[in-house]
Image: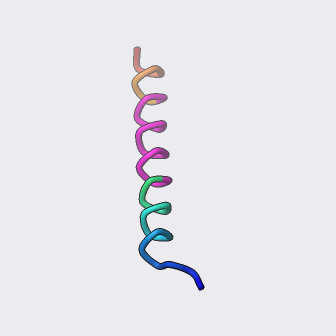
Amino acid sequence: MINPKTDTEQAYMKNRFYFIWKSLNYKLLID
């Protein structure tokens, strides 16, 4: 059975990583 808690945590971490990666690229573009 799928554990909804871990699924949500994985999705959250993916979104968080994606957001950080995007902001880093954004900073690099500006600099």
Outermost bottom residue: 1
26 versus 29 height, above or below: below
Q: Residue at x 50, y 53 (%)?
A: 14
Across and down, in percent, residue 9 comes to 42, 63
Q: Residue drawn at (47%, 79%), measured in percent from left and top?
A: 4
The residue shown at (44%, 53%) is: 13
Query: Residue 8 versus residue 26: which sits nearer the camera?
Result: 8
Q: Is residue 26 above or below residue 5?
A: above
The stretch in magenta equals 14-25
Residue 6: x %, y % from top left: 46, 68
Q: Is residue 5 magenta?
A: no
**Along the line of sight, which residue is nearer the eye, 9 or 27?**
9
Query: Percent position (x, y) of residue 1?
Result: 59, 85
Locate residue 19 relative to residue 1 in the image: left or right.
left
Of residues 2 and 8, the one drawn nearer to the viewer in this rendering: 2
User: From the viewer's perspective, is residue 9 above or below residue 30?
Assistant: below
Name the main secondary structure of what is drawn in magenta.
helix
The quarter of the picture where residue 5 lies is bottom left
Tally the numbered discs: 0
Picture layout, residue 11 above or below residue 13: below
Residue 31, quarter of picture: top left
